Image (tube, coloured by chain):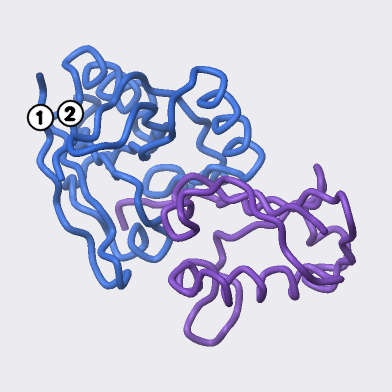
């Protein structure tokens, strides 16, 4: 599986991570699933973790999830994944990411060092939930 | 019978359906009905000990069942039950 992320959407993902720095930023990936999964737009989400924990954790409440899902339906798009930033850390999933991961979703993780977004990589949860598998990002 | 709303990431395990009609007088029965009919969805809702995974939330209408009677919350004809995930992650 490959995920197509147009440059303008990737720029918005970078901007989300830089704006949230030094905390983690997050949002939904709206688009279509298929042989090539395509990101059409992104939807910024608030990080609801408590003060002091947002540098290395993010949380989206069920109420915010529902609001995002209804927005996707309104746009006639699907939620195809989640993006989040790892401030001053590698763009690979942590054990905590795996424990909380949803199947089917693409997880785009962006490294943000010193407030500057460096690179994004995308990951999918394995069917048995044991690990993440990288999915290539196609930019255009 | 109540209708159970399936969130996007779990629809692939329910033949692509976003809503299914479920049987049972309480929420836990409805979930058991779901995982009996769609067994591959089970590992994403329950952990190895048969407990709800921490990111699985259930809403009856607009109310989180943790503020009602939890898995024992009664459901009936015409009720809408939603599975809504909490999304979390982090670098550590």
Q: Chain of mark 1?
A: A
> Color used for chain A?
blue
Chain seen in purple: B
Q: Chain of mark 2?
A: A
Name which residue lies at 57% across and 72% down: B37
Secondary element at tag 2: strand
- Counting from the top left corner in percent of width and height, residue B38 is at 51, 69
Earlier-in-chain disc, 1 versus 2:
2
Name which residue lies at 49% across and 74% down: B39
Name which residue lies at 25% across and 28% down: A38
Classify the position of the N terminus of chain B by image quarter: bottom right
State which quadrant residue A44 falls in: top left
Judge the density around disc 2: few (<14), some (14-19), many (≥20) Cα neighbours within 10 Å. Answer: some
**Viewer-proximal residue, A100 or A118?**
A100
Alpha-carbon span between mark 1 and mark 2: 5 Å
Q: Left or right: where does residue B76 sit relative to residue A109?
A: right
Whether tag 1 and tag 2 are in contact, CB under 8 A, the answer is yes
To the question of a shared chain for discs 1 and 2, the answer is yes
Q: Which residue is mark 2?
A: A4
Residue lying farthest bottom?
Answer: B49
The numbered disc on residue B46 is none
Secondary element at tag 1: strand
Q: Left or right: where does residue B32 sit relative to residue A96?
A: right
- Counting from the top left corner in percent of width and height, residue A99 is at 39, 66
Q: Which residue is mark 1?
A: A138
**Viewer-proximal residue, B65 or B23?**
B23
B4 shown above or below A69: below
Name which residue lies at 15% across and 45% down: A1
């Amino acid at each position: 599986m490959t995920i197509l992320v147009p440059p303008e959407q990737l720029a918005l993902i970078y901007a989300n991570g830089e704006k949230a720095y030094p905390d983690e930023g997050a949002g939904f990936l709206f688009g279509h699933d298929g042989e090539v999964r395509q990101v059409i737009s992104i939807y910024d989400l608030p990080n609801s973790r408590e003060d002091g924990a947002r540098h290395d954790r993010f949380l989206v409440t069920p109420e915010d999830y529902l609001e995002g899902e209804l927005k996707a339906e309104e746009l006639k798009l699907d939620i195809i994944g989640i993006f989040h930033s790892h401030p001053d850390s590698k763009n690979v999933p942590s054990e905590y990411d795996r424990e909380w991961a949803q199947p089917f979703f693409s997880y785009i993780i962006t490294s943000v060092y010193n407030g500057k977004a460096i690179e994004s990589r995308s990951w999918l949860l394995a069917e048995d939930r044991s690990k993440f598998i990288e999915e290539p990002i196609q930019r255009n | 019978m109540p209708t159970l709303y399936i969130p996007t990431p779990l629809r692939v395990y329910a033949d692509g359906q976003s809503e299914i009609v479920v049987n049972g007088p309480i929420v836990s029965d409805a979930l058991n009905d779901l995982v009996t009919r769609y067994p591959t969805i089970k590992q994403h809702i329950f952990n190895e000990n048969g407990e709800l995974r921490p990111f699985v939330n259930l809403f009856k209408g607009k109310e989180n069942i943790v503020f009602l009677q939890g898995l024992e919350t009664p459901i009936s004809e015409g009720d809408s039950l939603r599975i809504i995930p909490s999304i979390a992650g982090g670098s550590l």
